[in-house]
Image: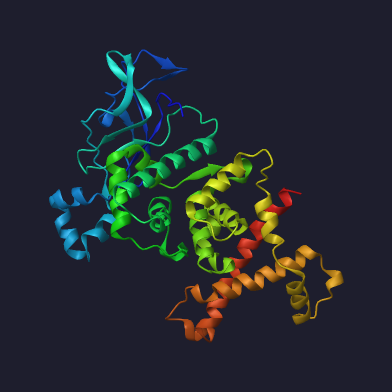
Amino acid sequence: MSKKYVIEDALLSCQYGNKTCELKPWDDRHIFSGEKGIASECDIGKLCCKGTFGSCRSPFFIQSNKETRNVLDQMKSLQQLALGGIFPCEMFVQLQWQNTKDDVFLGGYKALLEDGWTICGTGLGIISLVDSGQEEEIPAQEMLERLEQLNDMVDTYMSEHNISPKKKAGIMDSVLLWNGYLETDTFWDYKSNEINRGFCSYLEKTDPHLFNYFERGLYIQDGERGPIDLGYMMGINKALNESADAWDCVSQTMIEDRGMYNGYLEACQQERGKSSYDSLTDFLKQYNSPDYDGYGRYKAYVDAPVQEWRDRYCMDRAYDPDKLSVEEQNMGVLRDMISGRIQSRMPYDEEKWYKVGNIAEQQAERASKVTDLFLKTLEEDTKKGE
């Protein structure tokens, strides 16, 4: 894969930050790509970034910063404080960008390439490039190439450490399954272990750019249908492999996040039993195909109920099936399935539950609202594809 030169407005990501910011080459740049200056290895420091990385969750910063001691005393652990990311980013970069073009110079400094990285001196977080700033022509193809690189890294690590092939799927999950979701939206099981932590440390040191590439969420922009959260898609796929009920995986957060919503629907279409790596690889190949139809994910979900379920739905409610379309019957079946599955997960007001009559009634009401919102969105998306 040919590497792109980095230009102004390329997105930067820090290992310990919760936001991205844009690169701004020094004003003395005289070589441009279009109207934007090309970046070099010396474009470091606060003035070379438009903004910051938001909040810092670096354990190194937390341990060394005196102002954190009083806060730390009130927390259960250092890890809890780090996850909170409650301290503003104080980016300080002195190390020149690594991974540059050795034979292309800008004012005596090497040109920066898209897999470049450096380190923040404040929190020791690896800073890498989310993109080059240039237009990504085939993002799915580039992601496939990154996956192939990751697969090679895993194979090399397993060979060097005599790790059983049975452990490979778990190692891949430790990288591919993003941990940036709320606990209430994580329906899959993942347990960290020494092997997985060892590989993540190995990847971080061996190829910081590839590490940061998978450290954040992975998305594909599917035109007017919006983003597809591929991390969430892989997570739901893993949950369904573990015999979870697809209808149980509907949540209010997922409905409000277009990327998670699309990722969930894509996962529901996938063949069961695949690893995270295989499910993502197969999806990206399908997405690259000229036959790919994004609207298919909505239609497939609506068409999931079988005739037996529709018959039971109409019989239980004394509906005349001849007066309801198949889609209307399907929506009714889905409504019952989803609201029934997610009811026990719905929050309730402990102080006012007695006014409702019982907790189950309040949970059922909230489950119905979430289900209605989901099905309304689904119905709108289905009609757009007709």
Say which of 385 and 65 sits in front: 385
Res 103 → quadrant: top left
The answer to whether any part of residue 380 appears in the image is no
Most extreme residue toward the right is: 322
Residue 110 point in image, percent of width and height? 30, 19
Residue 278 point in image, percent of width and height? 52, 51
147 vs 357: above or below: above
Residue 240 point in image, percent of width and height? 54, 64
115 vs 241: above or below: above
Q: How many marks?
A: 0
Q: What residue is shown at x 75% (from left), y 78% (from top)?
A: 312
- Horizontally, is 106 left or right of 75 in the view? right
Q: What residue is shown at x 52% (from left), y 49% (from top)?
A: 280
**Colour scheme of this structure image?**
rainbow
The answer to whether any part of residue 221 appears in the image is yes
Say which of 254 and 302 sits in front: 302
- Horizontally, is 362 left or right of 99 in the view? right
Res 78 → quadrant: bottom left
370 vs 57: above or below: below
- Horizontally, is 81 left or right of 273 in the view? left
Residue 128 point in image, percent of width and height? 34, 36
Res 335 → quadrant: bottom right
